[in-house]
Image (cartoon, rainbow, N blue to C red):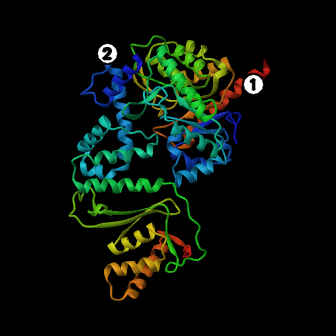
Amino acid sequence: MASIADIKGAGLGLKRELIPQIQSRYQTPEISNIQFLEIAPENWIGAGGKSAHDLAWFVERYPIVCHGLCLSLGGPKPLNTDFLKQVKVFMTEHKIPLYTEHLSYCGDTHGLLYDLLPIPFTEEAVKYVAARIRQAQDVLGQRIGIENASFYAAAPISDMDEITFLKAVLDEADCLLHLDINNIYVNSVNFNFDAYAFLRQIPKDKIVYAHIAGHLQVQPDLLVDTHGEDIIDPVWALLDEAYSLFGNFPTLLERDTNIPPLAELLPEIIKIAEYQARYRATQKAA
Amino acid sequence: MLFQEYQAQFTAHIRNPQANRKPARVADSRMAVYREIVFNNIFASVSACFPVCRQIFGARAWRKLVRGFFAGHGSETPFFREIPAQFLKYLSTQTIPEHLKQLAHYEWAELHVSTMHVETPPLSAQANLLSEHPILNPAHLLLAYDYPVHMLSKRHKTAEPAPTHILMYRDDEFEIKFIVLNAITYQLLKHIQQQAISGKQALLEIAKTLQHPLPETIIEFGQQILQDLLQQGAIIGSQKLKIIKSP
């Protein structure tokens, strides 16, 4: 069984387009910086054929994290515990040590909408979401990570800001933080707050690993979290700041749309590893 | 709870902006992002599964159909690959030509066979298709339609009704294969799919149904068909019949 300690260094979100390219370069120096992978359980649980065949190949060779999309932690329907039980079996079977989800919701009373929607930041919502995270942790028998999600529309009924909400949920649910650096930046532009001030309030001990990604600038004050572009410099700077504040932590590149050949993604993975090494060096010197 | 009332307004508006107003005091330019990305995501998931239907309906009609599905559907599955099945269910409630409903099913079947999880049963070392139970490739669907769905395309948007039987299966390389069957072969495969009977028993049943004067001819003919299907990987081998002791 891989453990959370095996999740380290730089990682890459596993997309089907990238599978043959990773396989053909396996154990070459070119991709040695890819130290762990992430999959969406909604795409892999119960899937046979090529998916099952590929998954078997990867679980033998890489530590893998489950990063979910459809649990709808903030949604109105009862938590899908049948699905969580399937996640648990899947994680055991494939030696996957960690499951993370978004601090968002993705459906209504009619069903799922398959996208990440913003939970209003209210005291009631903190209690509601934290209880559901606890319930999920009870079903899985382990702590889960919660990702700070990107969003585009502020709820006028919110009675606190995002970082207060995030910290309150983390406390109340006693869960881990899956820190998304790009989402901090995207939200800071969309809602005009100071990304660095947000970052400084992150509870360091809760961080389990991080995401970094590119986004799309639609308006000067509107960024959409497409995971389809190169990472921009201000986001790199924020990652650098996070390492200097908290020490380095495992960090994974997400690229979900507009996926280029693997060779074009490798510089970003190498850059993550270089940032991490830089911090490791200063840490030793200190 | 107040936040849930807000969420209900938020999602109702995304599903159907014409019928449901956005929540008060939320910038329309920002709601527009959600109206667009949530629908586009579902539209892409559905459309990827039904390329021929989409072409036959045309861009505008297809979009309208997916819109209707999006506005009112109640999909519970967290598994993305199952979204097309939910759309198929929705299509069955719509007034669209029957041949297109069947075509949609046929397109969904390809996705289903490519991703279905199967276990390979134990097989005899040597395939004995007549004396043992012939085993179909476990990743298969045996399909029957009232229209030649496999002939439909952008250039052939309609077809006269004609009973159409297709065996669809996944080969060792994960490619999806199609074999168009005649009605008798379809019956033969139904027999061996549903019951643990030998190839010979299945063929004798066929001969009986046909009231064929020379069952031996049917067996000879059928053996050739089973052998061909074995060569194509549609049948993967055979299993000894379980001996049932008489009381």
Closer-to-camera residue (A142/B18): A142
Can you say whether B215 is above or below A166 in the image?
Answer: below
How far separated are the C-alphas under marks 2 and 1? 52 Å
Q: Which mark is residue A128?
A: none
Can you say whether B156 is above or below A198 in the image?
Answer: below
Closer-to-camera residue (B228/B58): B228
Name the subunit of mark 1: A
Front label number (2 vs 1): 2
Q: Quadrant of residue A119?
A: top left
Q: How far from the left and from the top, in percent, is residue A145?
A: 59, 28
Can you say whether A55 is above or below B145 in the image?
Answer: above
Circle 2: residue type:
Ala
Q: Is residue B199 left or right of residue B182?
A: right
Q: Circle 2 sits on which residue?
A: B24
Q: Residue drawn at (59%, 40%), measured in percent from left and top?
A: A88
Q: Are marks 2 and 1 on the same chain?
A: no
Q: Is residue A243 visible?
A: no
Closer-to-camera residue (B184/B38): B184
Q: How far from the left and from the top, in percent, is residue A179?
A: 58, 25
Q: Residues within 10 Å of mark 1 (few under 14, many from 20)?
A: few
Q: How far from the left and from the top, in percent, is residue A242?
A: 63, 20
Q: How far from the left and from the top, in percent, is residue B38?
A: 37, 32
Q: Circle 1 sits on which residue?
A: A281
Q: Secondary structure at mark 1?
A: helix
Q: Residue drawn at (56%, 24%), measured in percent from left and top?
A: A181
Q: Residue drawn at (48%, 53%), measured in percent from left and top?
A: B115
